[in-house]
Image (cartoon, rainbow, N blue to C red):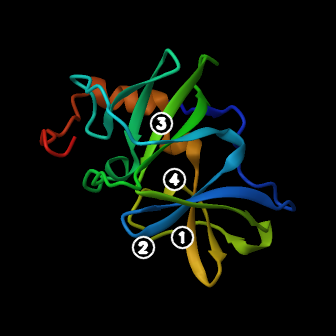
């Protein structure tokens, strides 16, 4: 199972503070490092692509480039995200094992803020209790008295893993209304 090599987003260095984009997903706060984020766009119409895993909602045309949009909620094994006025697509540049850059959109419920989180406030991921795969979590940060799940973007967006899920036929059926 290959992993995406982060092109510009990496985990926090042990002694450095870093900036993170925080966002809501299913009532929980998540964060990803801002260095790999290209842009944030309003959710618009998607083109549904047949035979994709349930967490790939479709593709968008971003200035002539075809960009797949991954529903993070579905990627985490939850229900598809409900689309609202505040739904956003966070565009991230990732690299596959072959080194080719690939823009991927992440569908999130709402974008919160860009925050600097001191490395000292990020704890190792829990070994149990999280409702997503442990390898998807880089750490747990405490921001303004609340826990924020810091995502390991290269694991969440493993192009090779997502491709193998599609090839293996692990594509749960989606309601047409859910898309």
Q: Which quadrant of the view contains residue 79?
A: bottom left
Q: Which mark is residue 135?
A: 4
Residue 167 appearing in the image: yes
Q: Residue furthest front?
A: 85
Q: Which quadrant of the view contains residue 35?
A: top right
Residue beneath the point at 58% across and 50% down: 152
**Image quadrant where one finds the C terminus:** top left
Q: CA distance from mark 4 to mark 1?
A: 10 Å
Residue beneath the point at 46% across and 27% down: 160
Q: Residues within 10 Å of mark 4 (few under 14, many from 20)?
A: some
Q: Are marks 1 and 2 in contact (CB under 8 Å)?
A: yes
Q: CA distance from mark 2 to mark 4?
A: 13 Å
Q: Are marks 4 and 1 in contact (CB under 8 Å)?
A: no
Element carrying mark 1: loop
Q: CA distance from mark 2 to mark 3?
A: 27 Å
Element carrying mark 2: loop
Name the residue carrying label 3: 105
Q: Residues within 10 Å of mark 3 (few under 14, many from 20)?
A: many
Name the residue carrying label 1: 126
Q: CA distance from mark 3 to mark 4?
A: 20 Å
Name the residue carrying label 2: 129
Residue beneath the point at 59% across and 31% down: 94
């Amino acid at each position: 199972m290959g992993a995406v090599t982060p092109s510009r987003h990496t985990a926090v260095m042990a002694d450095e503070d870093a900036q993170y984009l925080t966002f809501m997903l299913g009532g929980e706060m998540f964060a990803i490092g801002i260095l790999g984020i290209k842009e944030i766009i309003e959710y618009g119409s998607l083109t549904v692509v047949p035979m994709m895993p349930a967490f790939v909602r479709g593709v968008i045309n971003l200035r002539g480039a075809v960009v797949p949009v991954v529903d993070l909620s579905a990627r985490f094994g939850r229900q598809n995200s409900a689309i609202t006025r505040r739904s956003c697509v966070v565009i991230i540049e990732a690299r596959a094992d072959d080194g080719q850059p690939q823009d991927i959109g992440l569908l999130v419920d709402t974008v919160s803020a860009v925050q600097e989180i001191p490395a000292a406030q990020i704890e190792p991921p829990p070994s149990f209790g999280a409702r997503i795969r442990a390898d998807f979590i880089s750490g747990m940060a405490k921001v303004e008295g609340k826990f924020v799940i810091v995502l390991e973007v290269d694991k969440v967006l493993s192009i090779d893993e997502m491709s193998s899920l599609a090839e293996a036929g692990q594509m749960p059926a989606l309601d047409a209304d859910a898309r």
